[in-house]
Image: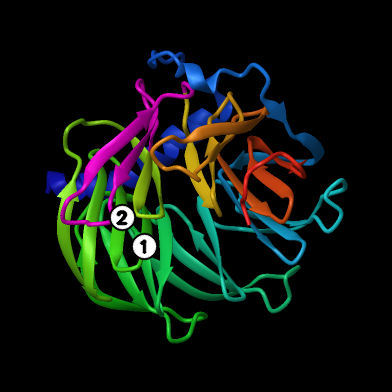
Amino acid sequence: MFKSIGAILAPWFLIAVVLQSCNAVQPERVSPPPDAKYARQGVKTAGLLGTVPTTCAEDIAVYLGYVYVADGPAGISVVNAKDPAKPAVIRTISTTFAYRLYIHENYLYLCDGPAGIRVYSLAKPSEPALTYFCPTTWASGIAFNNGYMYLGDYYDGVKIFLLSDPAQPVLLAANIPSRARDVYIDGTTLAVADSAFGLVTYILNAPTQALWTYIDSSRFANFEDVVMYNGYSIIARNDESSSIAVFRTLDPMHVELADELHPTRFISGITRFGKVLFAACGEEGVLAFDLTDMTDIRLLWVVNTAGFAQRAKTSGNILYIADMSGLCIYDITGMGGDWS
């Protein structure tokens, strides 16, 4: 009985924690000193174009001049950003707790926290139309691969959906056990950010058949996002020892830690576009890292935001940041790095 009560209460405890972070001063943390090669001296800062106030911006998605903001308890904000200097909210969509957003084909996929996953048609980008809803434990991350969708459902592992019709995913019986905060797929390797144990890897022998190969159980911590690039997996840790850990995962049967960076006190989320890693680092803003040499990741430039950077995404030479208290839009033309 106690286990079932805990499973019911746990998602709402997560919401309470996130809501408190939206309204409270962030606590001091004792992280290792930032690595010397990430010193800010001489680092270029991008130019701010426009902003839109939000309640608790967690993530963004960009499509045909529109920005969709996952605004926590305030739902999804639809922003007309065709002129990045004059963004304007044109519509809000009520949800439970808008947490993560993804674009697949011409559909918007929302991880709606404890409610589940929602899919919206973007046939008319200014008016997303709900086509699908599936209740889950705590929807927190999505990866798409060869007609399938892999959903990180936190307490309930990774759920697998068939996407023969992107508007109507079909939940399959298969489930991959893990406390999945985020998921990413490269080829046949599935990388999971387990919220407590860090990187977990699987080989997908078939879309619904996952063979566990590795778990980084060397430290118990708070892990956020995972991305993959060129035979490596990169995972963000966000606690008293915040870090970006780089693992060699080209051979998922022989995973090893390649490097671990401590650039800032906070690392709320990471995203990858091309050869650039964007680390949203809370009060430190967004740091862009060059991934050309995965054995020597270097800081390219920094965006100092006014709020608490949660997530960053690009479209062309424009950088969009979910900055908790606002959507911030920056021009990164000529800043360096290949994010195409």
Q: Is residue 201 above or below residue 295?
A: below
Label 2 vs 1, first from the N-terminus? 1
Query: Where residue 27 sits in the image (x, y, percent)?
Result: 47, 17
Query: Where residue 259 sits in the image (x, y, percent)?
Result: 33, 33
Q: Quadrant of the C terminus?
A: bottom right
The residue that label 2 is drawn on is 191
Front residue of 107 and 261: 261
How far apart are the alpha carbons under marks 2 and 1? Answer: 6 Å
Q: How many callouts does the rendering have? A: 2
Q: Is residue 15 left or right of residue 137?
A: right
Q: Residue at x 49, y 23 (%)?
A: 264
**Type of residue at label 2?**
Ala
Furthest-left residue in this view: 1
Q: Is residue 27 above or below residue 295?
A: above
Q: Residue at x 63, y 36 (%)?
A: 323
Q: Is residue 55 left or right of residue 243?
A: right
> Pointer 2: residues within 10 angstroms few (<14), some, or many (20+)?
many
The residue that label 1 is drawn on is 185
Q: Which structural element holds mark 1?
A: strand
Q: From which residue to which does the magenta span run?
A: 236-265
Q: Are marks 2 and 1 in contact (CB under 8 Å)?
A: yes
> Pointer 1: residues within 10 angstroms few (<14), some, or many (20+)?
many
Magenta span has 244? yes
Q: Residue at x 14, y 44 (%)?
A: 2
Query: Where residue 307 sits in the image (x, y, percent)?
Result: 65, 28
